[in-house]
Amino acid sequence: MVKSNLLAWTLMLSSGVSAGIGNLLVKRSRLNPGDNGLASLPLSPWFLLAIAFFLANVFLLAKAMDNLPVSVAAPAVSGTNFVVVVLGAALVFGESLSLFQYLGLASIVLGIVLVGRA
């Protein structure tokens, strides 16, 4: 049981990381779009890669829910996604973070831990 629960949490966290990477790739696809219209989206390799990460997110989350309740898995995936996007934006795109954003991230991580203990 513990092994399957560890696997489920690993899948769930991987799902959140995958979603976060997908969001960062969408941002990357829009940095030099050439054309700001919707038609340019499917032409961007960054956007297509983002779709692949979003698909991975759905499959990983679905598999995690084999052993985790949705009331735990879905909020944890969303929180993990949020943390990856905020930290990734700072690391990859050089976006600056305020003290309040760091406090918010810490609150989200604490919330994931508390929800997971339910």
Image (spheres, rainbow, N blue to C red):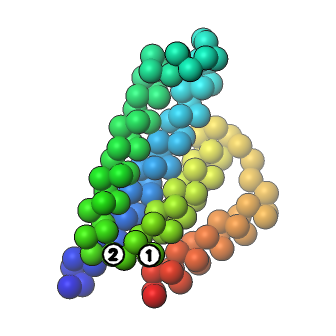
Instruction: Tell me which corner region of the image, top left, top right, bottom left or bottom right, holds residue 45.
Output: top left
Tell me if residue 7 can be seen: no
* Residue in the foreground of this view, choosing between 84 and 64: 64
The total number of labels drawn is: 2
Q: Amino acid at mark 1?
A: Val
Along the line of sight, which residue is nearer the eye, 21 or 42? 42
Q: Which residue is pictured at 53% across the width and 83% down the height?
A: 114
Q: For the point 62% across and 25% down, which residue is it?
A: 31
* Viewer-proximal residue among 109 and 78: 78
Q: Residue at x 34, y 71 (%)?
A: 9
Task: Name the residue rendered at 44%, 36% in the picture.
Answer: 50
48 is higher (above) or lower (below) than 64: above
Marks 1 & 2, CB-CB < 8 Å contact? yes
Quarter of the image where the C terminus is located: bottom left
**Residue under circle 1?**
72
Looking at the image, residue 104 lies above or below residue 33: below
Residue 8 tag number: none
| Residue type indicated by callout 2 | Leu
Q: Which residue is mark 2?
A: 68
- Quarter of the image with the N terminus is bottom left
Label 2 element class: loop
Q: Image height check: is 105 above or below 113?
A: above
Which image quarter: residue 74? bottom left
